[in-house]
Image: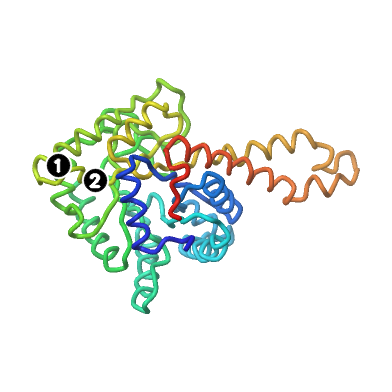
Amino acid sequence: MPIATPEVYNEMLDRAKAGKFAYPAINVTSTQTLHAALRGFAEAESDGIIQISTGGAEFLGGQYQKEMVTGAVALAEFAHIVAEKYPVTVALHTDHCPKDKLDGYVRPLLAVSEERVKAGGNPLFQSHMWDGSAETLADNLAIGQELLERARAAKIILEVEITPTGGEEDGVSHEINDSLYTTVDDAIRTAEALGLGEKGRYLLAASFGNVHGVYKPGNVVLRPDLLKELSDGVAAKFGKASPFDFVFHGGSGSTAEEIATALENGVVKMNLDTDTQYAFTRPVADHMFRNYDGVLKVDGEVGSKKTYDPRTWGKLAEAGMARRVTEACGNLRSTGTRIK
């Protein structure tokens, strides 16, 4: 059962929350980066989450038409086949989807899963993300209610981002300023609109100073302790302890202490993209520099097919990214926690 059923995905998230660990959620843009993520999880003996952003799906759809739904469905179907060969369980997820792309991405993908479930099967994806952080909170939650209802019917978990994550990802950008911190009032309004599980399960990407992309330590002030304040504030009002399943966005460059605090305060999923992109590309750059005369037909020579064969440098790229995924499992305490 390498691709989680809805029941198993819920079990995975429950186990992470109870055990105070999180699953690395690895963005993939090709069959090879998918294999790298699966390999990294397998070598860490950790279950995990594979995710596709709108830009990743567009890339997967091919540069001729750049069709997001085609790209996402194709890779998901591929994952259902090849993941059978790996001794871990993974969930398939779609990453950041802003309002202007809902009709071209998440809503059609929900329809695909709705049809599968009506036919007696399981959804194609196990969770989808709605990124309404560029909207007012009222509009964000109104759309979230609509999507949560559809997701619940299709046995899918929704992820919502209620306040901005700084930096830029797939064309969605926010300044790095004081708006990057979710308030207790924001969390209470979220619970009022989306419920605390009775209307459908959702993951909450709350902001505690998170920034997408590459940054040096000290340039961003993360406050993972804020997650406890949000939980306690909602728990006091609604009488439900530890009410949220939190997601950590923009984690590149985070310290071990910041990650540990986030895990203690309810984070069950942490996104990785920037670091894994570099881990995939760095061995390729090294290969090209070391084998310059082989990968190029310099001065009329023929080069070396063995060095420019994409399989040669592709294997190095896969191994490099897999190592970074395995490292992430260690950082997030998911190593050795796979469902047997």
Indicate the amino acid at tag 1: Val
Can you give x and y, in whole percent of width and height, for residue 10 in the image?
32, 57
Q: Residue at x 37, y 45 (%)?
A: 269
Between disc 2 and disc 1, whose residue precedes?
Answer: 1
Give the CA separation, mark 2 to mark 1: 9 Å
Can you give x and y, in whole percent of width and height, for residue 134 in the image?
29, 44
Please indicate whether residue 72 sits to the left or right of residue 167 in the image.
right
Q: Residues within 10 Å of mark 1 (few under 14, many from 20)?
A: many
Quarter of the rendering containing residue 263: top left
- Name above or below for residue 261 compared with residue 18: above
Indicate the amino acid at tag 2: Phe
Helix, strand or loop at label 2? It is: loop
Residue 234 marker: 1
Which residue of the protein is positioned furthest toward the top in this rendering? Answer: 218
Q: Residue at x 55, y 41 (%)?
A: 277
Q: How is the image coloured?
A: rainbow
Tell me the residue that label 2 is attached to: 244
Please indicate whether residue 66 sits to the left or right of residue 223 in the image.
right
Q: Residue at x 29, y 63 (%)?
A: 151
Which residue of the protein is positioned furthest toward the front in this rendering? Answer: 340
| Nearer-the-camera pick, 97 or 326 | 326
Q: Are marks 2 and 1 in contact (CB under 8 Å)?
A: yes
Helix, strand or loop at label 1? It is: helix
Please indicate whether residue 22 sits to the left or right of residue 141 in the image.
right
Residue 114 marker: none
| Nearer-the-camera pick, 192 or 236 | 236
Q: Residues within 10 Å of mark 2 (few under 14, many from 20)?
A: many
- Name above or below for residue 151 compared with residue 235: below
